[in-house]
Image (cartoon, grey):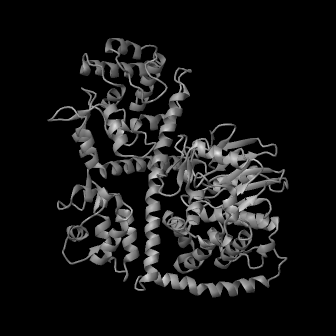
Amino acid sequence: TSPHTILRNIMFRLARFGLAGTSTTARLGKVSNRVLAPRLCHRSISAASSTNAAAVIQRIQTNVGGEEPSLHALLSSLGLLGAASSLYMYLSQKQISDAGHVTRCEANAAAEQSFQLFVALDAKEEMEKVRLAQIIHDLHALAREERGLRRYVTVMKRTATKAFRSKRRQSRNILNRHETRIHQIGDDLISLDDVDLCKLSTRGARDIIESITAGSKLSVPSLQGVVESATELLQKEPNLIDLSRTNKTITFVGDLHGSMNSLTHILKKIDLRDRNRIIVFAGDFVDRGVKSLEVLVTLLVLKLAYPEQVYLLRGNHEDTMVASVYGFQDQIRKIYGDDDTDVIWDCVGDLFASLPLALRTKTAFAVHGGLPNASFDLKDLQKLPRKARFALKTTVKPESAEDRALTGLLWSDPTPHDVGIAENPRGLGVLFGPGVAQEFLQRNNLQYLIRGHECVASGIRDQHCGEDKSVITVFSAAAYPNNIGENKGAFLHLLPDGSYSHESYSLQDTAESTEKVKNETTENALEKVRAMIGCSRSKLEKAFSKVQRGDSRPTVTVEQWVQVMSSSIDFAGMPWTALQPTLAPTSFWSGMIDVDEFLKSHSLRVHDSEHMDNNEAETLAENHEMLLTVFMFLDVNGDGTLSLKEWRTGLNLLNKRLPKERQLKNPEELFKALDKNADGEISFEEFASGFGMA
């Protein structure tokens, strides 16, 4: 019988006799082996499995003697916890039960811990992407100042294409405005030259969406036509769309993030032919999903065909800088090539900036992120000139008070803690407490604040903030991201009487190929955690030295390890307790964690250089992918090498966004350390390949 079968049988028996709690990370506690052994072997599920379980217990008794190891120590020492996945990950996939003796609470808790891991890593990635987007923003500013930078050519190219687009728009407008046919002009390209997009019929919209869903792509002129027509329509809408007088049912859809499966599911559930139905898409249509372009085009086509029933709000990913570092621009480039992408991207930037910022009903305020400050009022949005909205193609570097307010609407998050207004770990926007939310809703005579921006396990989360007021988060991309996650998607129906209902759904594909991707994604997540630990080794060494026992072979308890990891690597929601058996298994004999062995197994390799300070080496390792992107931008002549000047520029931009203790203070010395052949240059390949786990 496989180790997993033995493990399953052991877990059945533990649960049967009350030796395991409702969490898969529960420990046995003080239970002697003379009591444990017969109970584990009692009432076997089958004779064969009983024999194997008995053999396991015999081995425990022989090796442990009178000691009482923890559950994690037992399972880890028996080889039942693999390096690639821990117990909670195994149970989250199996949903095991034994005649009702092992409840689904175990599996649910396991799935929740797995979900927490991905959410925590997602939050960390967003922090890094925001920092990269800010650096890219600064590089664009440098490109305008220094004509020698190659991106300046791109800027000039985009400017030169505006006249061409204007002429193309004029020629398109004189086409037959009553045609709604789409023409196949290749195996996977369709043309809308005969379609009047300003008067797109519902039949024409269905034809376009069906073609896109089937895998067809719009030709470059057709894609530009859809984007520009939608931009013109959206620019006519106010910053705050007012639906307070409607008596229709309003459906709110949260983040889609390139999930065409989720969008298709939603459109099957909601019949837009019902004129008493309005649907609001609350931002984050693109990024993190492989069908971002298809999702965006589908939504724009729906807006053109149903201008009074479909409303699109801006999310923090509808941003030229954010979408460029998260991959949406690369998706367009992969389909259309470099030259056409430059033209398309300029149109997309105008589209993003044209999107309205919020919407209100009789009872609700809908926005992508949340409240930008404690005194924010709906009148602030109404007073803001629309031109200020159109000018803000990116929110990563807000400069004026108006820019900061708009940024807060797209990036802010609620917190259950009554902190008023606090700093947001994302790096942009704020955290607002229930008191701030309640006061805003009371001030504007509203009941709900409906928003997206956060992945939640069930697809919807209702945070009550007192006096029948709520902040409701809706996330619509099921199995996020790319159909490999654990979360459900949801959408919310706000009824005319002020009540609401919601529908949740799951799109997890159980096919073998998708399961393989899930396993690879789990392993990739664990590798990210290991790299995170390696980049914090100096801090961890100091923290462990304060609590460890022993001098020759320092050790810590599981509880001490979790406490040190939580305090030293500050990422909210990281399930360190569940990760402990995989990352830092306990000793079979003592039940303790060997600190030296743990740190050694998470050592970083930084160009095999012995001439770097540990903190500098860790900072370089933590930010090397970001630096590589910056260096590629700064590579003026495109020869794939870095000069000392380019190295200094990149490090200076990074240092501006690092805490003082993590800044790289000696760029010249670091350059020399990385320049192995002392030729005054560092190749990109050499730089990129010099980082990893030892």
Residue 646 position within the rendered picture, expressed as x and y whole percent measured from the top left? 32, 76
- Residue drawn at (69%, 45%) of the image: 442
Pick the residue in front: 483 or 616.
Answer: 616
As drawn, is 199 to the left or to the right of 162?
right
Residue 22 position within the rendered picture, expressed as x and y whole percent measured from the top left? 49, 26
Q: Quadrant of residue 572?
A: top left
Check the image and report above or below for 404 versus 635. Answer: above
- Residue drawn at (51%, 65%) of the image: 396
The quadrant of the image that shows the N terminus is top left
Q: Is residue 340 visible?
A: yes
- Residue drawn at (62%, 44%) of the image: 459
Check the image and report above or below for 346 versus 204. Answer: below
Pick the residue in front: 440 or 361.
Answer: 440
Residue 647 position within the rendered picture, expressed as x and y whole percent measured from the top left? 30, 73
Q: Is residue 506 visible?
A: no
- Residue drawn at (62%, 84%) of the image: 162
Q: Quadrant of residue 20?
A: top left
Check the image and report above or below for 53 versus 566. Answer: above
